[in-house]
């Protein structure tokens, strides 16, 4: 029996077999009759030979024998799950991806740390400048409109110069966003009303009750039943706020109920977001949603501010009222910039971390804001008042941790 020549590729010369009596009894397979695939990559060069032979065949390429000396040098042969024989000619070391993974993780951690730092710094300066403005200018509706106006200018600037992609919003989406803009407007308005009446630390202590209203509204409108752990975590929040309120030196009912109303409206916004926006097929990211809500809030509140408080932010009126116009304008602008910046950064963080992590960060932010405002304004704080604030904030932290514990499904 005359053996046929074996040709693998144009780059390999024609090879002739040596006559071997013991080899005549075996049926040779012509490599020309087998489909051959070449696979080239940066790490290795492989030659895949697809064979219809099964493991019981007398000719198994996975067994090397000395009888094939001088024919074809077969390196490591591997059989895949689809009866494919993969012949690897060479294997180069893989690139050092493992060295780049820790660097990427470190870079993400540093970026997240910077964002959290900016979130806290912008929030601190917003509360300081905003309190200074509200002490000199007792018109919270006008102050809130100015903050939304500055935010709207920034949003439009980013859209015009493609710093952030301009959204294409349908009429149905706008109709769904209007209720969110309304409660967002009321939430920030009530917060400014409270800041104008009581100390910054007390306003934020009352606003620590946001989880309480979140649980109540979610149960009422979304049918979400809280776990026993969540209910227990609300007890120190309510008790701490009550203790702090009784011993607060700057306490008055207008500031207290304004902060409470801010809690209700802010948590109503979250409930509406889940109830209305989740059902929409066309979704948008949080920053785009916040940008649209900011512009809408300015449009909604500007006429109300003129109707309720008139045009009181003119230089003529401020000079007649004995207010330093340049100082008031500067601090109002800085407060508005910090207001928009800290909310933008908050949404950027929310896109990078889980809601639980964001809640913990928000709890820490409230501690930082309360502490910094007490130190800056030299707010008198009694031991009982500090204890109540601490208990309330500890309850908020506990709530953010136990919220992720899901209730066990009831057995049928």
Image (spheres, rainbow, N blue to C red):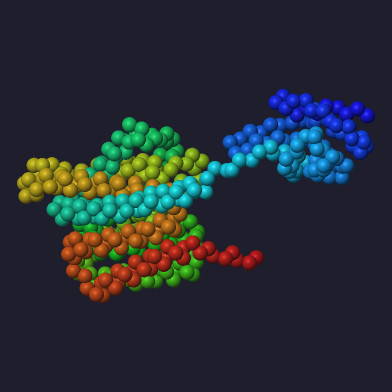
Coordinates of residue 175 in the picture (x, y in percent): 41, 40
Quadrant of the frame with the C terminus: bottom right
Residue at 27% x, 51% y: name it: 122
What residue occupies the far bottom of the structure in this picture? 384
Coordinates of residue 213 in the picture (x, y in percent): 39, 61
Coordinates of residue 173 in the picture (x, y in percent): 43, 39
Residue at 36% x, 32% y: name it: 162
With 168 as the anchor, is 130 left or right in this view? left
Q: In this rendered view, identify the residue nearer to me: 131 or 342.
A: 342
Classify 139 as above or below 246: above
Classify 204 as above or below 306: below
Q: In this rendered view, identify the residue nearer to me: 125 or 52.
A: 52
Q: In this rendered view, identify the residue nearer to me: 223 or 39.
A: 39
Residue at 32% x, 43% y: name it: 294
Q: In this rendered view, identify the residue nearer to me: 215 or 58.
A: 58
Quadrant of the frame with the N terminus: top right
Inspect this view and state whether residue 308 appears. no
Residue at 26% x, 71% y: name it: 386
Coordinates of residue 88 in the picture (x, y in percent): 69, 39
């Amino acid at each position: 029996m005359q053996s046929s020549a074996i040709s693998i590729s144009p780059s390999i010369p024609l090879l002739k077999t040596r006559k071997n009596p013991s080899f005549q009894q075996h049926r040779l397979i012509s490599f020309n009759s087998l489909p051959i695939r070449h696979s080239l990559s940066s790490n290795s060069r492989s030659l895949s030979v697809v064979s219809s032979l099964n493991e019981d065949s007398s000719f198994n390429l996975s067994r090397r024998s000395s009888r094939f000396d001088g024919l074809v040098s077969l390196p490591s042969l591997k059989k895949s799950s689809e009866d494919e024989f993969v012949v690897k000619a060479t294997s180069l070391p893989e690139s050092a991806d493992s060295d780049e993974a820790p660097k990427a993780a470190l870079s993400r951690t540093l970026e997240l740390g910077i964002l959290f730092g900016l979130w806290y710094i912008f929030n601190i300066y917003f509360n300081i400048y905003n309190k200074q403005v509200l002490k000199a200018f007792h018109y919270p509706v006008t102050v809130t409109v100015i903050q939304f106006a500055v935010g709207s200018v920034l949003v439009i600037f980013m859209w015009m110069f493609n710093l952030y992609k301009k959204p294409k919003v349908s009429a149905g989406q706008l109709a769904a966003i209007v209720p969110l803009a309304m409660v967002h407007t009321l939430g920030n308005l009530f917060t400014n009303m409270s800041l104008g009446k009581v100390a910054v630390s007390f306003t934020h202590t009352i606003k620590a009750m946001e989880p309480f209203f979140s649980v109540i509204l979610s149960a009422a409108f979304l049918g979400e039943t809280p776990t026993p752990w969540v209910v227990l975590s609300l007890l120190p929040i309510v008790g701490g706020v009550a203790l702090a309120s009784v011993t607060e030196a700057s306490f008055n009912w207008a500031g207290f109920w304004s902060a409470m109303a801010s809690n209700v409206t802010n948590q109503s916004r979250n409930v509406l977001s889940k109830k209305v926006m989740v059902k929409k097929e066309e979704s948008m990211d949080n920053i785009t949603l916040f940008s649209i809500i900011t512009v809408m809030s300015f449009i909604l509140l500007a006429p109300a501010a003129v109707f309720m408080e008139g045009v009181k932010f003119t230089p003529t009126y401020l000079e007649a009222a004995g207010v330093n116009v340049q100082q008031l304008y500067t601090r109002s602008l800085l407060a508005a910039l910090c207001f928009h910046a800290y909310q933008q950064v908050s949404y950027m963080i929310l896109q990078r971390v889980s809601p639980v992590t964001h809640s913990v960060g928000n709890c820490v932010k409230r501690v930082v804001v309360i502490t910094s405002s007490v130190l800056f304004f030299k707010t008198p704080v009694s031991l009982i008042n500090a204890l109540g604030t601490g208990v309330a904030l500890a309850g908020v932290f506990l709530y953010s941790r136990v919220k992720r514990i899901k209730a066990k499904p009831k057995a049928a």
